[in-house]
Amino acid sequence: FVGALISTLVISLKGTTVPGASGFSRFVSRSLSFAGMSLFQSVVAAAIILYGLGLEVRSVPLFFLFSFITSLTFMFIVQAFVTWLDMPGRFLIIILLILQLATSAGTFPLELIPDWLKPLNPWLPMSHSVLGYKAIIASGDFDLVWKQAGILGIDAVIFLALTLVYFLIKGRKAKEVSAEPQTA
């Protein structure tokens, strides 16, 4: 999640170096860039955890795949917030990160968090990543892993669609501005 946020500082989310690029082209370019960074970050993190720290998991390939799905979901959530809202979006992402860390049952058992935070647990994507990782690492319940991966995938598609809407709207407005007759 933090890697996704940092990525938004490295890659421009809205600008383009290609004059006249359509909103859809810009969306594809940004999304593929973020997907590539997501793949790189997830492979590096998973490799360090598995081979550097020596974590034993029930399925190494599934661990890598689930790490990528989780990373991609987080990347697309961050991309949507920052694309739509820029700096306020980054602020909201930090708030979302804090809420997720508190409610995902990864840091603290769910029973220890305040009652008013408990209802957020099933709605935040980090909760699903924690459940999936627990299953890959400890229980070997791969049905649970796939269920959590599906939920994360749905989250990824929703936020990717929100980003697409932004670029289509902005692309349409840019075409309308460039099509207006210039006055002297």
Image: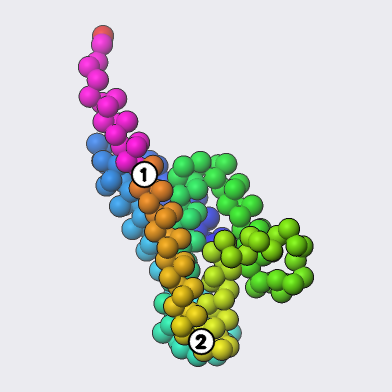
Q: In which image quadrant can residue 119 be found?
A: bottom right
Q: Is residue 94 above or below residue 70?
A: above
Residue 175, magenta (yes or no): yes
Which quadrant is home to the C terminus? Answer: top left
- The Cα atoms of the two marked residues, 2 and 1, are separated by 37 Å
Mark 1 = which residue?
165
Q: Which mark is first along the chain, 1 or 2?
A: 2
Mark 2 = which residue?
141
Q: Which residues are magenta?
A: 167-183
Question: In front: 182, or 78?
Answer: 78
Q: Is residue 114 above or below residue 181?
A: below
Q: Residue at x 57, y 61 (%)?
A: 123
On the rendered structure, is 180 left or right of 67? left
Could you tell me if residue 131 is visible in this image?
yes
Which quadrant is home to the N terminus? Answer: bottom right
The image shows residue 61 at horizontal and vertical percentages of: 41, 84
On the rendered structure, is 14 left or right of 137? left
Disc 2 crowd rating (10 Å Cα; few below 14, some 14-19, many 20+) is some
Q: Amino acid at mark 2?
A: Asp
